[in-house]
Amino acid sequence: MSKELRIIPLGGLGEIGKNMTVYEYGRNIMVVDCGVMFPESDMYGIDLVLPDFDYVVENQDRLRGIVITHGHMDHIAALPYLLQEIEAPIYGTPLTLGLIERQLAEKNVLHRTELRVLARDETLPLGPFRVTPFAVAHSIPDSVGLVINTPAGTIVHTGDYKLDETPAGGQATDLAALQRLTEGGVLALVGDSTNADRPGRTPTEAVVRDTLDVLFAQARGGRIIIATFSSLLARLQEIVNLAHKHGRKVALTGRSLVENVELASKLGYLQVPKGLLVDIDTRVPHKDLVVLATGSQGEPRSALNRMANGDHRHVRVGAGDTIIISGGTIPGNEEDVGRMLNKLFERGANVVYGRLATVHVSGHGSRDELRAMIETVRPRFLIPAHGEARHLHLHAQLGVEAGLERENIFVLKNGAQWVSDGQKAWTVESLAVQDVLVDGRLVGEIGEVVMRDRHRLSQDGFIVALIPVNGKRQLAGEPQLVSRGFVYLNGARELLEAGREEIKKQHRRGTKDMARALEDFFYRETHSRPVVLPRFIQV
Amino acid sequence: MSKELRIIPLGGLGEIGKNMTVYEYGRNIMVVDCGVMFPESDMYGIDLVLPDFDYVVENQDRLRGIVITHGHMDHIAALPYLLQEIEAPIYGTPLTLGLIERQLAEKNVLHRTELRVLARDETLPLGPFRVTPFAVAHSIPDSVGLVINTPAGTIVHTGDYKLDETPAGGQATDLAALQRLTEGGVLALVGDSTNADRPGRTPTEAVVRDTLDVLFAQARGGRIIIATFSSLLARLQEIVNLAHKHGRKVALTGRSLVENVELASKLGYLQVPKGLLVDIDTRVPHKDLVVLATGSQGEPRSALNRMANGDHRHVRVGAGDTIIISGGTIPGNEEDVGRMLNKLFERGANVVYGRLATVHVSGHGSRDELRAMIETVRPRFLIPAHGEARHLHLHAQLGVEAGLERENIFVLKNGAQWVSDGQKAWTVESLAVQDVLVDGRLVGEIGEVVMRDRHRLSQDGFIVALIPVNGKRQLAGEPQLVSRGFVYLNGARELLEAGREEIKKQHRRGTKDMARALEDFFYRETHSRPVVLPRFIQV
């Protein structure tokens, strides 16, 4: 085995080095993070996308451990799938481990790992790696970046971060610790690129707190309903504090929110004054109540969307209610969110969202922060990670602006193998990786062919033509058409009748490619292209 | 017939009063605008959505004419469909009529109308209506708002507008003319609400021009490729001017862009210095060239997306190219645009988009501008229009802030009938209207059932089970399964074999609802729910 360090970024859906990173030295592998992507809107029927961890599975005998930076789904939720194939210890801070434990228990794989606490002032030895976490500000408490000492040099793996000096929960990114830990020089910075296309700095969480404070004061007689991500625990803490300040109780609705609040309270990451939390079905005057709900993305079965549709069991939205969407809209969800907002307004509520007031800020640093990180760490090599190609390239441009040599910046793809001997760095042949699609219980069994079929079915539906023939392949009865998603059959008797006549005509002519002939016929008639599947039935 | 004025807003996809408005007085109807909506991302297979113009068709004998405010598709592109059902004269400014003429000619309905020029200083009599246009600043030249005098009072119908004092092309919103025309008082303001959720003012086009100027200067040795909407003719004029200033030729790629530039030049709305335009296949040094391309929305077959995919016939993108996306991303297109940007970066280009620089501004006014309009017009009644429910409600809030009485503000839905006798105003029973879906040649034939089927097919595909039976309904051979979009059949032989066994088992048991039994079986096996259609075949 060569004495070289390898870094292999993995991810899904165009996100590079987001969900998982493999570090390798000699006969030793460690993995950082193991998360999922949620499908894009044209990935019909897909629940989740996993990174391709074949390489880790094939080399499991060399795996020393899995280190997790924080507890968001895109960094932890593939663990249950990986642990179905391998056994390995998982290291993380206490809240992160708490969230992981729940994920693993749900999928019955908890027994296949040991969860070990990664303490912030300790160094974890993993084979030739020495891993020391440092605190970072992000939208979930207990987030860390990693300083990874290897025989080839020191790597800084930032994880998700922003440089917020007044963050929620009080955990700022600990640049002082980072400087101390990297005094001996840094071989490479593997840095979060999420907001590399946003100029300036990401606003501090303190702005959100101040805005919410004003909105709480203005709401006076009415109820306040706030939708946010259940994983945005730092935001939840602010809202709890404001409710306390303004003399309101807090009720929770939405399973993930209830679970996360319970877990974070138990572990001490959420401080809730006694008596502040009430059950959602408790009768509290509207002026004294804050409802915290899931649904900032307009998800169909989320609490806020149920309120919008008038079918939430406990909350009936109306005039006097102030509804605050305290979460950014994830690209692809704009239409769902828009429809939900429309319905909430139509019920008479005052809804605050988007640009109307700063009720949400990103958990990732913008360009000035990424630049400050580069200048703090002064790495020999920069590996932009955690972003799509456009973000990585814009992060790379920033590296050049910050004084790094262009040839020392590596914009990689998933599966790329970055190699360094501690002096030089280069890439070698990439691993063949692909997105692994999860659809119900089917993991990796849905591929391109099925996705293409689903797309075509979604556009124009299908027609199965049942054509009865006798032993001499002569027509032996009336053809039948079975169809869905094409035209509404009751309204298209003539079209289908014409279709059956076409089958008879083509059969008389001895047409070989009946599917093609029928596709052409229906296209001529409708300018649509349903999937056509003829089946000859021997009768 | 009563001596009352009626206003009926029409639109599609949640947009209220956007695509069409009906004005009615006594036995007289006039229509303002007649446009389409483009489908949302979950409206599988749909090309266009038309407003429901049944009411206009049923009352065509009373229709005095159709007045169009400007030449954007959401205001003109339903005219060919309406003219297939009725005949009526169309009034508009010269550029608007030019764009309409092309639409009508393509659909062979030009002979069913007369296109009549609406001059800006003239008053058009249409039955009891007197229509006087006033200039508005918008992202296409020759846009107008309408002052409509009726026996019940004066209506101001703004059309799309912003209050840009330094607009592209030099056409500002003529508030002086509007004040003069409304000296006698205004009964109702029917006002654009598109950006009612944006605080402040929409930035002026002059900012875009200045930003582009800087980017042109920075591009030096390389080619500049700019993607924008082909209908954003004012922006095209700026780019032409900048190319001239910086000594570059301009080449066009994308059919709609070539056609619009030709039309606008012919009619004098686009001033192109002689010799500036070159064919896209002309050999020009990169430092001397600007390529104007369609594709700001990442549309699959647009010019810029072809460049991103490396299959544009004339332009091969590479290092040195500066690519500017000078058009906002329409909600629902974020993922397509993101993928295109990734590919352009991967080809080595420098891409400027989104927040990186102000290379696009909206053509619609923000809250301060909507408020200025209310204060200029001082209407008795406010009818927020041209927006989804959330925008209308936020526009209504603005009306209250500007001093109007809450009960004098009418947030309507499509098909609502607003009625006024010149003193009071009220609503009467709404018309039953629905979105009319266009799929190829099928107009209005695709309804909810088909859309639901397409959605389900897209998620999990289908299985048609062919079950051969004899005259006694006994199984008379092996069942066959025809399936697409469920699982990849070659990889799922065992599953399908088990499915066939299940059919036999259920048939032996005498199961009545075979579809349900098979749905349950496949759900148990896969946690997916394909559409299951059993067909018993008499053999």
Image (spheres, coloured by chain):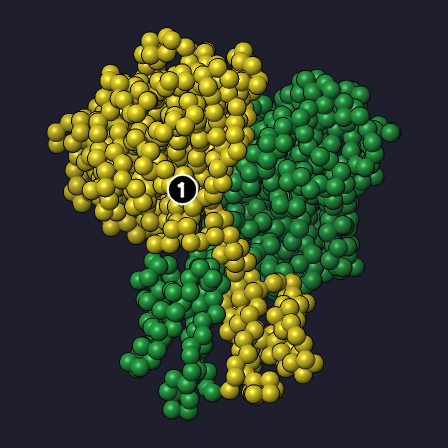
Chain colours: A yellow, B green
Q: Amino acid at mark 1?
A: Asp
Residue B263 x/y as whole percent = 79, 41
Q: Quadrant of residue B517?
A: bottom left
Look at the picture and state if B492 lies above or below B191.
below
Residue at 73 percent across and 26 percent down: it is: B223
- Residue closest to the eye, A62 or A109: A62
Look at the picture and state if A21 lies above or below B504.
above
- Residue closest to the eye, B31 or A110: A110
Q: Residue furthest right?
A: B274
Locate residue B360 relative to residue A227 in the image: left or right: right
Chain letter for the residue marked with disc 1 in the picture:
A
The residue carrying mark 1 is: A54
Locate residue A507 relative to residue B538 in the image: left or right: right
Residue at 41 percent across and 10 percent down: it is: A185
Locate residue A213 relative to residue B427 in the image: left or right: left
Q: Quadrant of residue B462?
A: bottom left
Residue at 47 percent across and 21 percent down: it is: A420
Residue at 64 percent across and 37 percent down: it is: B308
- Residue closest to the eye, B417 or B282: B282
Label 1 sits on a secondary structure element that is: helix
Locate residue B320 relative to residue B244 in the image: left or right: left
Q: Residue furthest left?
A: A274
Residue A353 x/y as whole percent = 41, 34
Look at the picture and state if B202 lies above or below B494.
above
Quadrant placement of the N terminus of chain B? bottom right
Q: Residue furthest front?
A: A1
Q: Quadrant of residue A524?
A: bottom right
Residue A259 x/y as whole percent = 22, 39
Look at the picture and state if A373 lies above or below A289.
above
Q: Residues within 10 Å of mark 1 (few under 14, many from 20)?
A: some
Report whether residue A84 is seen. Answer: yes
Report whether residue B305 is seen. Answer: no
